[in-house]
Image: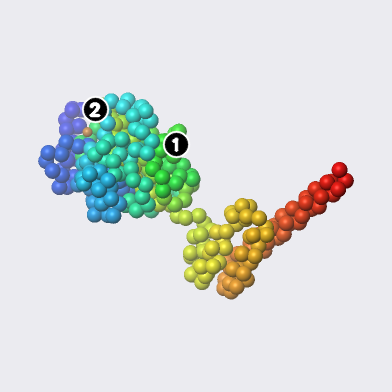
Amino acid sequence: MYVRLLTAAGLLALASVPALPAAALAHGSPVTPISRTAACGGNGSKTSAAACVAARKATGGRLGAYDNLRLANVNGNDRERVPDGELCSGGIALYKGLDLAREDFPSTEVESGQRLSVSYRGTIPHEGSFRIYLTRAGYDPAKKLTWDDLGTEPLADIKDPPLTGGAYRMRVKLPERTGRQILYVVWETSSTPDTYYSCSDLVFPEPAVKKAAVKKTTAPPVVKKTTAAPAPVQETTPAEAAPSEEPAVIGAAPASADTTMVNIGHWLILGALTAAALVAAGAGLNRARRRKNG
Ligand SMILES: [Cu+2]
């Protein structure tokens, strides 16, 4: 009965996967959110995307099949088997181009707090567990992915999720992130020796400050720049920062409530700068006085 059920599930899965070459002895990849393998790999759905073209070029002209990125006998020791910087290829030469640090791999727009649906196409179903990782806050998409970027714990570890319509269906709750991130899915099968690896590129909204500035179309570029500016204040000396910042805001017409807020923010910064300058001057005086006295 069990065997018959499995067979039925297998046939169903095969039947619902369109246009697969009969000879494909291959096994799976996340299609939602789209993975680099599913987009760029052999038989992938976005092979003409610039990043996919570059990935193929970096792999000697062709990439392995989209559903066949797997290593045998890993037994859960992913970090020992897959080298840093080669996570998206699983360290496999035929997928090397997927490791490129590019910000234009086909991606999925998501939001913090969202319960993200993950569909992992199983072209040949296997039993096993899915470990789903997300890059940490502060991950730099301009650098190749490392294990350290993924932290120590997966977002989820899901054993034998349901296989419907040819795909394993799961959900993971996304924590707070901004900008480009990578969902890294490890499928450790228990019915074969193989473990599968994949990178899915996610795009979270940019930080709220920037978003607000973008929404108000009235805000001129100058104001936007000022809105993002508070951080450098600590890095620059008051003498340098004050003159270069001041004209930018004073010149900008206060077109909206947002701009007013920006101006208030700016005056607060100026106040802080002035205070800092006063403290610095005070310290200088003290030092001078001490030198004089000592
Ligand atoms: Cu397989």
Disc 1: CA contacts within 10 A as few (<14), some (14-19) or many (>=20)? few
**Would you place residue 38 above or below residue 161 in this image?**
below
The residue identified by callout 2 is: 192
Which quarter of the image is occupied by the C terminus?
top right
Which quarter of the image is occupied by the N terminus?
top left
Q: Residue at x 27, y 36 (%)?
A: 92
Question: Residue 244's x, y, as percent?
Answer: 61, 64
Q: What is the basis of the colouring in this image? A: rainbow
Question: Residue 253's x, y, as percent?
Answer: 58, 74
Q: Residue at x 78, y 51 (%)?
A: 284
Element type where label 2 sits in the image = loop
Viewer-proximal residue among 168 and 276: 276
The reply to whether the residue tagged 1 has its Cβ within 8 angstroms of ligand 1 is: no
The residue identified by callout 1 is: 148
Residue type beneath disc 2: Thr
The reply to whether the residue tagged 2 has its Cβ within 8 angstroms of ligand 1 is: yes
Q: Upstream in the sequence, badge 2 or badge 1?
A: 1
Q: Residue at x 30, y 44 (%)?
A: 98
Residue 156 sits in quarter: top left
Q: Residue at x 34, y 46 (%)?
A: 100
